[in-house]
Image: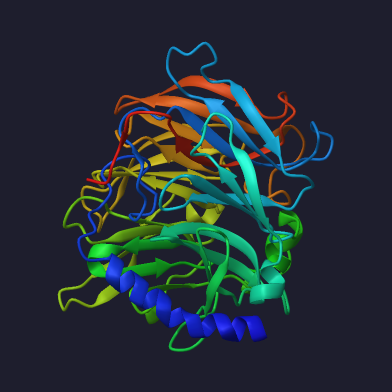
Amino acid sequence: MKTIEICMRKGAAIGLFLLGALPGLAPAYADETCNSPFMAGLIKGQEQFLHVWTLGEKGIGDESDKLVTIDVIPGSATYGEVIHAISVGGRGEAHHMGFTDDRKYLWAGRLDDSKIFIFDVGSDPSKPKLVKTIDNLAESTGYVGPHTFYALPGRMLVQALSNKKDHGGITGLITYNNAGDLVATTPMPVDNGGDGYGYDIAINPGQNRMLTSSFTGWTNYMMDLSQLIQDSSAMKNFGNTMVLWDLKAMKPEKAFSVPGAPLEIRWALKPGADWAITAGALTSKLYLIKQDENHQWQAKAVADVGDPAKIPLPVDISISSDASSLWVNTFMDGTARLFDLSNPEAPKQVYAKKIGAQVNMVSQSWDGKRVYFTTSLLANWDKKGADNEQFLKGYSWDGKELKEDFVVDFHKEGLGRAHHMKFTARAQKAERQ
């Protein structure tokens, strides 16, 4: 408790730090569309390496969680092949990753044992090196399940999913400096409509706004999925809100009712398009967050994803750099769906392709011509038997059809369950524009 109290007092310093950092900040114009707008060292052209944070799986290879690196340089002798893998030891529910603002380091978290691994990807992105492990998150903050890693100037903002006390969904945000030292904790709001849950982070610096979404606690996300959906009491323990924050002050301003576990959040990157979109996993709906005619921020459902009655379970989403389209993966039917966002008030599905028996994460290049998919959702939520396909698939997108370029079978390669992806490159990087 002493550590938390000390850190909370330091929270004001973060606000002042951001206050000084925001003026003059320009939006990013290259790289993946989901990265923090505070990130430098952007990839100007073709991504060269794709890193996959991979869950260890019993009976597969060394059975440990690992960071796997794939060569995605067209024409390379090892194009579409694994060129490096570094195991971190044990299985702790490897999940998401995020770059530091200088892009030199990649932070990766585990939802079960709450360990955070920091990899050096700046020295040689083809061979990441583990340089630090943070293994006292629960003891130092009271929170567990580090999920989203979002770069702030000189800082890393981490959204936790749960808490040490009861493993429920009440949780908070944690701020570290880039060296991995704890700076502050910020609880998720439990009043004025907030339910205390957390999941993703997305920042619009021009509007001084941060959005957070909500999922569920350790007890639920570590439970077998078939058991969970039959437990009516447990199914009540999912987040149903998003929160709009004053970024400079790091204070919640408004909680929106967004039923059914709103997951990934994507701000439109088109200049002047100050709206964001998310998908509700349990409601199978897209929700739009924007200001109304009275300049009040609101959230509302704007489209169904598949047939909500069949619970296709929308998971990851990826918005195009011009905010004209959105890829939405639905885990249960293994399908990637493309929505036309030319009118964000009424998105329309214009394309669909079955990627496999299950599909979870999606990443697209800035020009939208390359789209990558992986399979694992959570170790205890992935499908069983033959449907437990674990792969990375790379596609070309010509505006009409996805064309498969390569497949890496993570089981045949002895790697495990393929989850979150991040791009890096050695050269042709652009400074912030």
The quarter of the picture where residue 32 lies is top left
Question: Which residue is found at the position 28% from the left and 48% from the top?
Answer: 28
Q: 213 or 54: which is nearer to us?
A: 54
Q: Nearer the viewer, residue 197 or 339?
A: 197
Quick check: 226 left or right of 116? Answer: right
Confirm whether residue 9 shows in the render.
Answer: yes
Q: Tell me residue 345's x, y (percent).
A: 25, 59
**For residue 424, above or below residue 154:** above
Whether residue 312 is visible = no
Q: Position of residue 232 (x, y in %)?
A: 69, 71
Judge from the rendering whether residue 368 lies leftward or rightward of residue 356; answer left or right.
left
Q: Is residue 105 above or below residue 169?
A: above
Residue found at x 48% / y 44%: 329
* The C terminus sits in image quarter: top left
Q: Residue at x 70, y 71 (%)?
A: 138
Q: Is residue 428 above or below residue 157?
A: above
Q: Quadrant of the N terminus?
A: bottom right
Residue 309, image x, y percentages: 52, 56
Residue 151, given in percent of the width and then of the height, sits at 43, 57
Judged left or right of residue 241, residue 409 is right
**Res 142 quadrant in image:** bottom right
